[in-house]
Amino acid sequence: MKSIYNFSAGPSMLPTCVLKQMQQELLVYGNAKASVMEISHRGPDFMQLAHKLEQDLRDLMSIPKNYKVLFLQGGASSQFSMVPINLLQGKTKANYANTGHWSKKAITEAQRYCKVNICTDSTDNNYTDIADFSAWNIDNNAAYLHYTPNETIAGLEFDYIPKVDMPLVIDMSSSILSHQIDVSKFGIIYAGAQKNIGISGVTIVIIRDDLIGKAMKNQPILFDYATQAKNDSMYNTPTTFAWYVASIVLEWLKKQGGLKTIEKINKNKAKKLYDTIDNSNYYTNLVAKRYRSRMNVPFLLADEKLNSLFLKQASDNNLIALKGHRSVGGMRASIYNAMPEEGIDSLIQFMHKFEKENG
C-alpha cells in the first residue's frame, strides 16, 4: 500500500512505528497480562511507565530539577484558566500577547480573573506578523507574561523570547519537542499532546517549583497545581492510554537523536516547502518570512475556485487533511515531527503538477 501522508493540524499524524507498537501491545502490555487500558494506574506496570515517561521528557528537554512535570487533563484550554488561578498570586493584572487564534482564547479566559494588558497585538495584520519586542507595551506590575510561540492556524511563529522580570508562560501545544529550548527561561510551559507528543487526552505542564502553592481560594481543587504536583498528576484517574502513547513517542524521539536532530529535520522540511511556495507564481504564503512557522504552513492558490479540486486530487494522491482553517482559507500543511521528509517531497511533487495543469 502506498504511504498516506496526514497533514492534519491535530489530532495529527503519528510515526508509523508508534502505531505498529500500539497495535502489537493493544491486548497485552508488557508483563501486565492485560491491555494498558485495563490495568490500574496505581499498579507497578503503569507506575513504571509513568516514571519513564517523565524521565524521558526531562531528558529530551533538559528540564531542570527545580521544575515539576505534570500530565493533566482538559487540554491546553484548561490552562487558560489554571494559569491565572495559580499565577496571579494577589495581583490584579497580567500581560498577554495577542498573536493569533489561541492567544486570543487565552486572553478571553484570563479576563474572567484579572485585568489583561494586551502588550502586543497582531490583529491589524491578520496575524501575519509580530511586532519587535522593543515596541511591546509591558506592564511591569503585572503577575506574568503569556504568549503563544507558534500559532497553529495562521502559521505564525516567534523567533525570539521576550525578556521580562516576571514569569514567562507559553502555550507550546503546536511546537513542543520540535526544537531545543532553554526551559529555565520560562515559568510555565504547557502543551496539548495531540500534535507532537501523542494523542489527545493529556496536557503537559512544566512549572517552576516556586510558582506552585499560591492558587486563588475557592477554585476547583483540580485547578490547583499544588494538588496535581503532590499527587504526581494522579489526584484522579489519569488518561492512561494517552500517557502510554506519549511514552512511545518520546522513546521514538530519543531514537531519532533527540531534539537537536529533530530540529534540523524540521528546519529542512519547512525550508523545502516554503521554497516551493516562494518560487511559484501560483502559491502564496502571507506570513512575514521572519515569523513563518516550521510546524504549520498555510498557503493560498492563485484561483480559490480550485481549492476543492486541489483537495480532492491531493487526497487521491494520499495527501490528506490539507484544508486551511476557515478563518484563513486556502491550504495548511501541518508538518509536525512525525511527518517524514518523504511526505514533504510527495506534497511538493503534487503541488508542481497541480500548478502545471491549472496555473
Image (spheres, rainbow, N blue to C red):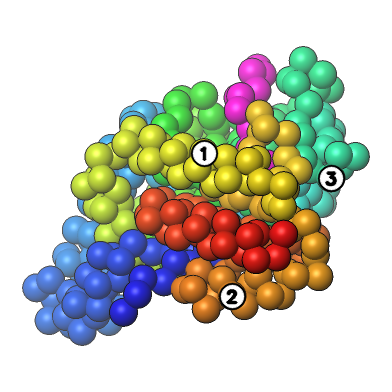
Q: Quadrant of the C terminus?
A: bottom right
Check disc 3 and report the residue beneath it. 126
* Residue depicted at 63% across the width and 72% down the height: 311
Q: CA distance from mark 3 to mark 1?
A: 23 Å
Front-most of residues 262 and 237? 262
Res 3 label: none
Residue 270 on the magenta segment = no
Q: Hey, which residue is sitting farthest left in the picture?
A: 31
Q: Is residue 164 above or below residue 60?
A: above
- Ranked by sequence position, the earlier of labels 3 and 1 is 3
Identify the magenta region: 154-165
State the quadrant of the N terminus: bottom left
Residue at left 75%, top 70%? 306
Name the residue rendered at 65%, 70% in the picture. 310
Residue 220 seen:
no
The structure residue drawn at horizontal position 19% and vertical position 58%, both measured from the top left corner, is 48
